Image (cartoon, grey):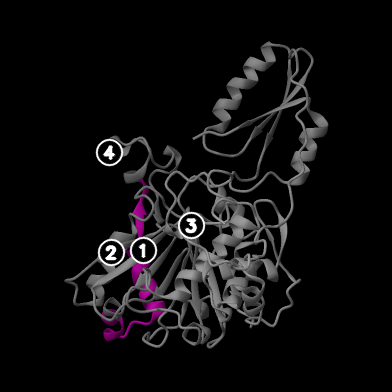
Amino acid sequence: MTEPLTVLDPTAEATSGRRSLNPRPVGLDGLTVGLLDISKPRGDVFLDRLEEQLTTRGAMVRRYAKPTFTKPAPVDLRHEIATQCDAVIEALAD
Amino acid sequence: MYDRGWSDGLPLVPPTRERVLRMLEGTSRSADEVVALMPPNLVDCTVEKVAVNSVMAGCRPEYLPVVLASLEAICTDDFNMHGVLATTMGVGPVLVVNGPIAARIGMNSGVNVLGHGNRANATIGRAVQLVVRNVGGGAPGGVDRATHGSMSKLGFCFAEDEEGSPWTTLAEDRGFGPSVDVVTAFCGEGPRILVDQQSRSAESLVRMLAEGLLASVSPRTVMGMDGLLVLSPEHMARFSDAGWGRPRFMEELEKFLMVETDGILAGAGGIAEGLPEGLGGLTLPKFRPGGLLVVHAGGPAGLFSAIIGGWLNGPMGSEPTSREIIQ
């Protein structure tokens, strides 16, 4: 009988923390909605239209943009959105 | 090991304790030293974890310093490995090795340099990708959702042919002294062949190379994407015979890499893709200053060179990044 082969773990041996999403808002009236442009071409076209739609439904809109779509949003920007908004919509485009 | 998601699709060498300990003898660095903050999960990656993945990739211990330096290069804000991994474009780190270490560990800079058949070339690039996958958590189907992918995502590493080149090396061009062991990471796709079998003069060949380079990534990009040109020995001979060094070559090449923007505006020629109208009437270089890297490599026969197209460059994307290889 052959000995069992022991191999070392090539992974980080860590599990990502999981956080649950906030409950989905029942309506938009009086809510502050953040619109995050990831800085891809024409993202602004999409978000401009969303802003119009949201505003007519009674939401207040705040606009944000990542410096570049190729890198994760900076921590400060994520913190700003989290503290200023009730909901956020992130837009890709091309 | 397949079932645990550790493989890139090819068989792996089981990372037993003995093999990992032997791998660690390839570096003077301690096993618990943190090499880099590994994207996309941003976890501390130790020398030991790199050694485990290097065993699995099939590396010999003497390759480990190159793997470590490569990881240090790509895990920087400049190189932006997170973005390189996450983009839908099929790009990955292309690793070019300069210095005496290349010959010492048996790297290939000659026949089939961008292809198969050399253990060091094949396994160093693979080890780097396995670390990103296993330590960083960047597996295809997860954060990596590239439309087509490319061989540069499997592992793409080669050495410059320094001995056969009359020019300064890529590493020297990037500010390192001669005989320093350096790895340069370039975010690129797979190689595309540029054929010129008829030019007998430097003046003719430089024009032909420029014509090929103008189509790198897309004929409608200017300055936004870098390129890596791999000049073959027979093509290099045209320039060395004419007495052209690297500076003269770059100067001549750049003259033919100027683009009239009117021809590549959105809508020009019935093609919607292109530059915004506001950029009309200009003459711009295909590559930003310093955006075309040139190395000498390949077999002694064959009137071909190769172009490896880049990705979004500079602070908005990825900057070519070099690191000294420490034993």
Assign a secondary structure to mark 4: helix
Q: Earlier in the sequence, mark 3 or mark 1?
A: 3
Q: Which residue is mark 3?
A: B153
Q: Nearer the viewer, mark 2 or mark 4?
A: 2
Assign a secondary structure to mark 2: strand
Bounds of the magenta span? B237-261
Per the picture, the main secondary structure of the magenta-coloured stretch is helix
Q: Quadrant of the N terminus of chain B?
A: bottom right
Say which amino acid is labelled 3: Lys
Q: Quadrant of the C terminus of chain B?
A: bottom right
Q: Nearer the viewer, residue B140 or B257?
A: B140
Say if residue B158 shows up in the picture.
no
Q: Earlier in the sequence, mark 2 or mark 3?
A: 3
Q: Which residue sits furthest right?
A: A83
Q: Earlier in the sequence, mark 3 or mark 4?
A: 3
B163 sits to left or right of B128 = left
- Chain letter of the residue beneath label 4 in the structure image: B
B110 sits to left or right of A54 = left
Q: Estimate the spatial distance between the alpha carbons at disc 1 and disc 2, rounded to whole Å.
A: 7 Å
Say which amino acid is labelled 2: Leu
**Other-residue count near label 1 (Cα within 10 Å), few / some / many at <14 / 14–19 / ≥20:** many
Q: Estimate the spatial distance between the alpha carbons at disc 2 and disc 3, rounded to whole Å.
A: 22 Å
Assign a secondary structure to mark 1: strand
Q: Estimate the spatial distance between the alpha carbons at disc 3 and disc 4, rounded to whole Å.
A: 34 Å
Rendered image: mark on residue B269: 4
Q: Which residue is mark 1?
A: B307
Say which amino acid is labelled 1: Ile
Q: x and y percent of residue B131 in the render?
A: 61, 61
**CB under 8 Å between callouts 2 and 3?**
no
Q: Estimate the spatial distance between the alpha carbons at disc 1 and disc 4, rounded to whole Å.
A: 26 Å
